[in-house]
Image (cartoon, rainbow, N blue to C red):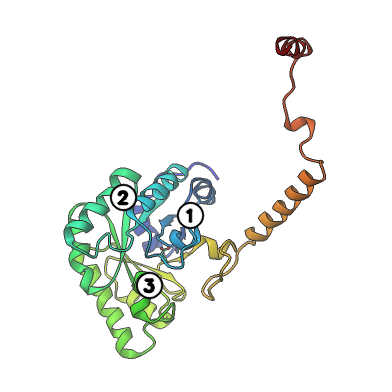
């Protein structure tokens, strides 16, 4: 791909105005960020899902701000023009407005992010407003919010019933009014997502497993490329089985080292005879 200009907030809103869906993927490391940058992905989420996909925890709850900063900075180095979003981990914004501003600021100052994301509806509007007032673009996250998985009763569809769906619609309005420039709807029914998208005034609505009618789509990279060993959720499509490709390569590596067909002369470096002879002499 030809080098592209840095993605900006106006560029994202221009895509929405043109009706061109925005592409968004999670990413947690430098080489994958480089690939996503080459593919022209618009937005990258350095999600706290890295607790599960990269660190092997059972949930996102143990992830710390320091974990997030280290991964977000690596992604920024690999994807200099994508719109990189730092995902605020558990208890980095819930305790107070002050903690929300301070930790959002860390993503911008220490990792070079373009925006931050946090989970929750109207109850988080004061955090969203304070972060936005500090000049940091902020994204809300509604529906299945993994940091509240215990309270939600597991990783399951949210907003199936009218009352719960109404709350999602109301929460989206509250977040937009608080200053969120974008809201992610995770695992809500397609028609709820469409309603929220239609009602959004100056807010980009993104879908993760919530149907086609949002302004763009997000997927977890490890789900889309078969790299998470525990499960692949229904909302994801496997676009390429990178896990199988790597596994085949690993089998070949074990085979070749064991069978002494790796390394070959092109994989090592020699030494001039006279230097070697001198070495033997020096060693006595
Ligand atoms: O951490 C993450 O990747 C997320 C997605 C589940 C949206 O927040």
Nearest to N terminus: mark 3 or mark 2 = 2
Of residues 177 and 30, the one nearer the viewer is 30
Q: Residue 232 at x, y = what percent?
A: 56, 71
Query: Splitting the image into 4 quarters, where does residue 150 fall?
Result: bottom left
Q: Residue 27 at x, y = what percent?
A: 47, 55
Of residues 259 and 29, the one nearer the viewer is 259
Disc 2 to disc 1, C-alpha distance: 20 Å
Disc 3 to disc 2, C-alpha distance: 22 Å
Task: Report the residue marked by disc 1.
Answer: 41
Residue 70 appears in the figure? yes
Which residue is drawn at the image coordinates 38% and 52% (left, top)? 67
Mark 1, ligand 1, within 8 Å: the answer is: no
Which residue is drawn at the image coordinates 66% and 54% (left, top)? 246
Which mark is drawn over residue 107? 2
Q: Is residue 171 above or below residue 38?
A: below
Q: Residue furthest front?
A: 284
Of residues 218 and 280, the one nearer the viewer is 280
């Amino acid at each position: 791909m030809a080098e592209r200009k840095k993605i900006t907030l106006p560029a994202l809103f221009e895509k929405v105005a043109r009706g061109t869906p925005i592409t968004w993927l999670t990413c947690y490391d430098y080489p994958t960020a480089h690939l996503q940058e080459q593919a022209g992905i618009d937005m990258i989420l350095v999600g706290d899902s890295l607790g599960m996909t990269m660190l092997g925890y059972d949930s996102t709850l143990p992830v710390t701000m320091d974990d997030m900063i280290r991964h977000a900075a690596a992604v920024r180095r690999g994807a200099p023009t994508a719109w990189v979003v730092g995902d605020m981990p558990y208890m980095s914004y819930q305790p107070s407005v002050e903690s929300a501003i301070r930790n959002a600021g860390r993503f911008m100052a220490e990792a070079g992010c373009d925006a931050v994301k946090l989970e929750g509806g109207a109850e988080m509007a004061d955090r969203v407003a304070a972060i936005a007032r500090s000049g940091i673009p902020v994204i809300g996250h509604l529906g299945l919010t993994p940091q509240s998985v215990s309270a939600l009763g597991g990783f399951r569809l949210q907003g199936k019933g009218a009352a719960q769906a109404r709350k999602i619609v109301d929460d989206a309005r509250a977040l937009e009014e608080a200053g969120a420039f974008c809201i992610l709807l995770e695992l809500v029914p397609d028609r709820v997502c469409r309603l929220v998208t239609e009602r959004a005034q100056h807010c980009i609505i993104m879908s993760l497993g919530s149907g086609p009618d949002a302004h763009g789509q997000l997927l977890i990279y490890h789900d889309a490329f078969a790299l998470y060993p525990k499960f692949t959720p229904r909302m994801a499509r496997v676009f390429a089985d990178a896990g199988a490709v790597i596994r085949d390569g690993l089998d070949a590596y074990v085979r070749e080292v064991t069978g002494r067909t790796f390394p070959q002369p092109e994989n090592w470096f020699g030494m001039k005879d006279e230097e070697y002879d001198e070495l033997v002499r020096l060693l006595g």
